[in-house]
Image (cartoon, rainbow, N blue to C red):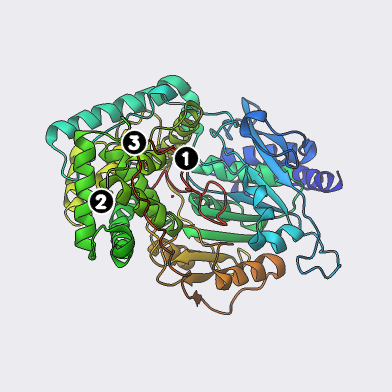
């Protein structure tokens, strides 16, 4: 493998330079040992390459996709210590012109993708090459996905018995009592304790800085001199850290739906911002349902739709649908609709049917997962919690959480407390915290990069895109105006796709920040008449032409639903 051999020689030269450099020229301070360890791991990975073959059966990937593993240090400060294996998937570039010109499209190497989370797997990503919006990119690039450290099958983490993970039905109070808060705080403390007991001292090594270092090792293993990377949601934060740590290794980078990288906002304040943004997004959805009152009968104003929703929640509190769907499950299902407009007709249909006496659509969309699904969701939740709790300081006094979120819930009740319960284990976390990097690149330090964002995205509020734009010199921001879908790349917006293709295929960016008109609003579907004995069917819950798993299925929390952060 010539590329790997070339990099191996370069890596050897780098290591020799580090070893021979005078003290003032060597990496010093926090992260110096990890920097050396990353260089060692990258050199080894470049020499070994990736032996692609059949994919793990448990991942249910098609035979056309090939998988392999890359060894990375558990602790980059000790690269000769324990190593873990990251699973990588790939589909080779087709080299076929989608316009059937007959010409062979030149290859541009690997495009590596991270779908977010933290806790989501990118192993299915190469399948997007079959989607029309991806044909041009798939012709030029090997599409590469991977399961980050901790995400099955890459040294999977667990914090509790998966059989105990889905606790339904549950309440979802927007003004929880002191007794309820005490109960949920005890659960959060037990969950944090479970993470520590199940993983031991290794738990401290699952964080975003190590995820960025892993990305550098995977790049080397692929034989790529420089990295072409696309990150969605949390993947943008990962990409920003990589750009700060390894700017000379960047070829092209796309940041889709941006997590605010300001160290002061990672992660506690980012969650507060997110809860507030979801209130606006919930209002958008209610206005849409009110505009289609003739179809769904939920009310012809946002206030009346809110009343219908609260009526359903109260009824579910008294008698859970199918024994599994209570107010929290209802809220979780409608929260997911805040990520993707594509969900809106299905959720409105389910709410309408439930209030008319047919609970089955709601059970289909919000009911208890299968045993296999519970295992995946518990793993995803464990990784989400470990990474975010390890990444930065969090308030350790519940009184701080209570004060901030009680105040916030007065104007943003829809998601605020659910977000608290998901992140509260970080108040009781037993592993050391990292200090977030202050991501900043000056002129010429980093190649030009592309930032994509929807103006009303709630999972990663628009302010994050503006913040990253100011921190990465030479970056250009493309905004989908008056839109809120989380993840805008290679979806139904031709304007956004044009900028994406121009950048990835030709390296061209707009001369200045650009705007795109929003995609069309979703069309309503006729609400079904209630029928006795209605057969259960899977919910049509995958957005059309969306990248796989941009949100992790962990819980109903927006940070963990980044399918964001």
Tell me: 331 left or right of 337. Answer: left
Instruction: From the image, tell me which residue sits under label 3.
Output: 426
In the foreground, 397 or 312: 312
Instruction: From the image, tell me which residue sits under label 2.
Output: 414
Nearest to viewer (mark 1 / mark 3): 1
Q: CA distance from mark 1 to mark 3?
A: 37 Å
- Tell me, for residue 537, which label it has, or none: 1
Nearest to viewer (mark 1 / mark 2): 1
**Residue 302, position in %: x, y?**
23, 63
Which residue in the rendered view is the most extreme toward the left?
A: 178
- Residue drawn at x 43%, y 32% is 369
**Residue 74, position in %: x, y?**
58, 30
Label 2 crowd bin: few (<14), some (14–19), many (20+), radius 10 Å = many
In the foreground, 90 or 201: 90
* Element type at mark 3: helix
Tell me: 85 left or right of 194. Answer: right
In the foreground, 215 or 405: 405
Viewport quadrant of the N terminus: top right
Q: Is residue 490 above or below residue 143?
A: below
């Amino acid at each position: 493998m010539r590329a790997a051999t070339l990099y191996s020689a370069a890596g050897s030269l780098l290591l020799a330079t580090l070893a021979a450099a005078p003290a003032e020229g060597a990496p010093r301070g926090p992260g110096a040992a990890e920097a050396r360890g990353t260089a060692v791991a990258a050199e080894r990975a470049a020499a070994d390459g990736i032996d692609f073959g059949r994919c793990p059966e448990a991942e249910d990937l098609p035979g056309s996709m090939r998988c392999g593993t890359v060894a990375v240090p558990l602790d980059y400060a000790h690269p000769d210590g324990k190593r873990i294996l990251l699973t990588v998937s790939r589909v080779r570039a087709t080299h076929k012109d989608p316009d059937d010109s007959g010409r062979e499209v030149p290859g541009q190497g690997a495009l590596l993708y991270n779908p977010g989370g933290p806790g989501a797997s990118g192993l299915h990503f190469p399948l997007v090459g079959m989607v029309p919006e991806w044909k041009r990119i798939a012709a030029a690039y090997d599409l590469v996905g991977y399961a980050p450290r901790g995400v099955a099958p890459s040294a999977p983490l667990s914090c509790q018995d998966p059989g105990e993970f889905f606790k339904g039905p549950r309440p979802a109070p927007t003004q929880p009592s002191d007794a309820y808060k005490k109960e949920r705080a005890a659960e959060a403390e037990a969950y944090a304790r479970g993470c520590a007991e199940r993983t031991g001292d290794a738990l401290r090594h699952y964080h975003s800085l190590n995820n960025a270092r892993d990305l550098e090792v995977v790049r080397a293993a692929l034989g790529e001199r420089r990295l072409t990377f696309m990150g969605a949601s949390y993947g943008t934060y990962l990409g920003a850290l990589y750009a700060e740590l390894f700017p000379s290794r960047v070829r092209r980078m796309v940041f889709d739906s941006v997590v605010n990288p300001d160290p002061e906002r990672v992660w506690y304040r980012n969650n507060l911002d997110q809860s507030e943004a979801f209130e606006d997004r919930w209002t958008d959805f209610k206005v849409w349902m009110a505009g289609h009152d003739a179809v769904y009968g939920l009310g012809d104003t946002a206030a009346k739709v809110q009343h219908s929703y609260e009526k359903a929640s109260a009824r579910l509190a008294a008698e859970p649908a199918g024994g599994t769907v209570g107010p929290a499950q209802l809220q979780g299902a409608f929260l997911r609709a805040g990520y993707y407009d594509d969900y809106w007709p299905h959720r409105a249909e389910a709410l309408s049917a439930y209030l008319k006496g047919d609970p089955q659509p709601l059970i289909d969309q919000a009911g208890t997962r299968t045993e296999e699904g519970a295992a995946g969701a518990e793993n995803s939740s464990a990784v989400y919690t470990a990474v975010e709790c390890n990444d930065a300081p969090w308030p350790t006094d519940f009184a701080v959480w209570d004060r901030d979120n009680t105040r916030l819930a007065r104007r943003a009740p829809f998601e605020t407390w659910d977000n608290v319960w998901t992140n509260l284990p970080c108040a009781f976390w037993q592993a050391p915290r990292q200090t977030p990097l202050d991501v900043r690149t000056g002129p010429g330090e980093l190649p030009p990069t592309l930032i994509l964002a929807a103006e009303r995205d709630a999972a990663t509020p628009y302010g994050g895109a503006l913040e990253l734009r100011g921190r990465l010199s030479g970056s250009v921001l493309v905004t989908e105006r008056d839109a809120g879908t989380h993840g805008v790349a290679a979806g139904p917006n031709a304007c956004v796709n044009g900028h994406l293709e121009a950048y990835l295929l030709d390296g061209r960016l707009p001369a200045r920040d650009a705007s795109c008109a929003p995609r069309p609003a979703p069309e309503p579907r006729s609400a079904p008449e209630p029928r006795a004995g209605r057969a259960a069917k899977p919910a049509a819950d995958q957005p059309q032409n969306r990248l796989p798993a941009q949100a992790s299925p962990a819980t109903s929390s927006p940070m963990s639903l980044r399918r964001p952060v």
